Image (spheres, helix red, strand yellow):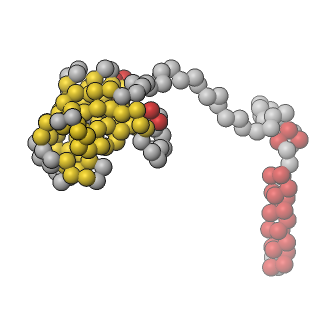
Amino acid sequence: MKPSVLAGTILGIVIAANGFAQTPRGSRGGAKGDQSAGTAGHTAPKPQPSTEASPSAPAGEMALGSVHLTSGVKANGQALAAGNYQVRLTAQAASPDAKGQTASLERWIEFVQGGQVKGREVVTIVPQSDISKVQKDTPPKANASKVELLKGGDYYRVWINRGGNHYLIHLPAA
């Protein structure tokens, strides 16, 4: 076969295939059982309604309880000495918003000692129904807290369980 005939045959096949691909599905005649005739193409499945309730967090300020820090940490970049602190949830939402988070579930907390705010940090609020999806460790009992050094020794986690929500605060070691 001559090269020009071969090239012409290949070019003809490509042009025919391109024309067929641009023809609307309903006008191709389709085979028996072809359900595409008369339809515009694939449609996405309908979204299923969510059965989960939207997570809720307490509105406004709220005392979360007291914690004992066994060593110094940093809260919002500032040193926070070891000692006992009252932890208070503020009404101020953390910003910028974290993608995928419900805005009311990322807030600021304050570490209070002797009536003075000694430090602030962002807290993640996790509803009781979602805690097993977020943390594998054993949570503190209701209305209790625990402070633990995380693997690697770089961060402390303050975990408070209060009012049906879990409050997770991660503080770098000082």
Farthest residue to the bottom: give it: 3
For the point 77% across and 32% down, the residue is: 35
* Left or right, 20 with reference to 142: right
Q: Residue furthest front?
A: 115
The one of 4 and 118 positioned closer to us in this rendering: 118
Q: Residue at x 82, y 68 (%)?
A: 11
User: Can you give x and y, in whole percent of width and height, for residue 113 in the image?
Assistant: 18, 37
As rendered, which of 136 and 63 lies closer to the eye? 63
Percent across and percent down for residue 30 are 82, 38
Q: Which residue is found at the position 53% from the left and 23% from the top? A: 50
Q: Nearer the viewer, residue 153 or 68?
A: 68
Q: Percent position (x, y) of residue 66? A: 19, 30
- Residue 105 can be seen in this image: no
Quarter of the image for the N terminus: give it: bottom right
Q: Quarter holding the C terminus? A: bottom left
Seen from the viewer's position, the closer of residues 90 and 117 is: 117
